[in-house]
Image (tube, rainbow, N blue to C red):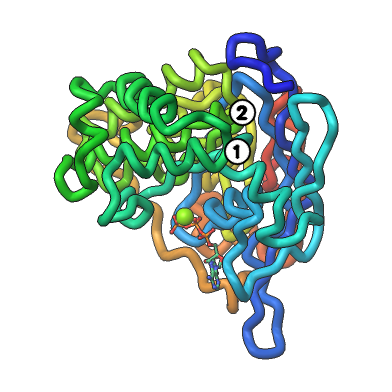
């Protein structure tokens, strides 16, 4: 039985990721790209994932959809999805592109990608692409699917949805394309929506509108949402909880307001200090020094130590820090809390 969004109980755990590791083959080596990652997302909750390029945000999100790119492999851990009828499914054990994962993808768990032009077909109208998705997962007639497509385009704020349905991706603006992608993702009432940098290609005003739209839809439809961005300011606007990642690992997780007010990791503090809102007028932005290291030369000890403004000596250099519980739902992986 499929519950309507309004009937769904709040705070039911939808997805539970435990100790997830993902690696890539490089000649004889298996290079770790994600290591020991654990998080969960409940219905009606938004988890924000933040970190610089290469921190493993997209890879972790793709693993939830069973879409680890070729050459990559889940090397450990589990991803458990709780079906609406309460049965559990272990996603990492499903055959790649098998019937079961395909039936979850798009229907139970949907994804909005960074660049809509790469995901929308240039040769099909917006409406026909939504109709195709709908007819893959439901038994709606063509006419009913068209009506639903127009309703969805209306729901994502398109002022003339019937006309947009007849247009091609290149005929509409970037913001409208991203709205169309969101409509497509919502077409089968997903219980979990994953948004991977959904606003990176947009100007600041359109970005704010799309974030506002996603927050409204998430609340109205009582979905679980994972919102990925490299911008900690943007993430903390929309997320209930924030997980900060660095070089494939969680470095801090907590309620958004606690992470913002009392960041427990120097990396989180550095990301926040680089935001204009956290800088006194007239003061230069504190940019984070250095670049994320290449995964082939992962620093010893704490992977952030060569760039850390609060470097505290040999333990940072030699010993991997463990996660410290700072408050009931707030934890950080840093020797400063030893
Ligand atoms: N197709 C691939 N082949 C080889 N390695 C890959 C591949 N995709 C990802 N990786 C490895 O996994 C790491 C994490 O990649 P991921 O795409 O998850 O980063 P990200 O945090 O989403 O970064 P960005 O902000 O740039 O999108 C990369 O730095 C790279 O080492
Ligand atoms: Mg990414």
Residue 30 horizontal side relative to residue 152, left or right: right
Observer-nearest residue: 211 or 89?
89
Q: Quadrant of the C terminus?
A: top right
Residue 155 horizontal side relative to residue 302, left or right: left
Q: Position of residue 283 (x, y in %)?
A: 23, 37
Asked whether disc 2 touches disc 1, contact meaning CB atoms under 8 Å apart, the reply is: yes
| Label 2 crowd (10 A; few <14 / some 14-19 / many >=20) | many
The answer to whether residue 283 of the structure is visible from this angle is no
Q: Residue at x 28, y 21 (%)?
A: 157
Q: Earlier in the sequence, mark 2 or mark 1?
A: 1
Q: Position of residue 285 (x, y in %)?
A: 28, 43
Residue under pointer 1:
109
Q: Which mark is residue 130?
A: none
Observer-nearest residue: 277 or 255?
255
Q: Based on the displayed image, in which of its 4 quarters is residue 264 positioned?
A: top right
Residue under pointer 2:
191
């Amino acid at each position: 039985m499929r519950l309507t969004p309004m009937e769904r109980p709040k705070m039911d755990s939808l997805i539970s990721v435990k100790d997830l590791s993902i690696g890539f083959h490089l000649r004889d080596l298996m290079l770790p790209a994600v290591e020991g990652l654990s998080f969960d997302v409940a219905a009606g909750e938004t988890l924000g994932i933040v970190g610089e390029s290469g921190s493993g945000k997209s890879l972790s999100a793709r693993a939830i959809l069973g879409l680890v790119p070729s050459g990559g492999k889940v090397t450990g851990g589990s991803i458990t999805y709780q079906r609406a009828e309460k049965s559990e499914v272990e996603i990492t054990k499903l055959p790649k592109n098998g019937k079961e994962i395909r039936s979850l993808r798009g229907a139970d768990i949907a994804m909005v990608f960074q660049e809509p032009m790469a995901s929308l077909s240039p040769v099909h109208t917006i409406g026909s692409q939504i109709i195709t998705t709908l007819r893959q997962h439901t038994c709606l007639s063509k006419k009913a699917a068209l009506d639903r497509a127009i309703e969805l385009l209306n729901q994502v704020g398109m002022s003339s949805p019937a006309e947009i349905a007849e247009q091609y991706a290149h005929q509409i603006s970037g913001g409208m394309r991203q709205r169309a992608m969101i409509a497509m993702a919502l077409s089968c009432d997903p219980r979990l929506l994953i948004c991977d940098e959904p606003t990176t290609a947009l100007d600041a005003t359109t970005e704010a509108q799309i974030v506002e739209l996603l927050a409204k839809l998430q609340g109205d439809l009582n979905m679980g949402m994972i919102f990925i961005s490299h911008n900690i300011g943007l993430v903390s606007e929309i997320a209930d909880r924030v997980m900060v990642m660095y070089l494939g690992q969680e470095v801090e997780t907590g309620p958004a307001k606690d992470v913002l007010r009392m960041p427990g990791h120097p990396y989180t503090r550095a990301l926040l200090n680089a935001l204009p809102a956290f800088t006194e007028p007239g003061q230069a932005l504190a940019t984070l020094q250095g670049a994320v290291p290449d995964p082939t030369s992962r620093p010893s000890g704490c992977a952030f130590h060569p760039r850390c403004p609060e470097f505290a000596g040999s333990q940072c250099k030699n010993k991997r820090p463990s996660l410290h519980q700072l408050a009931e739902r707030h934890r950080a992986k840093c020797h400063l809390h030893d």
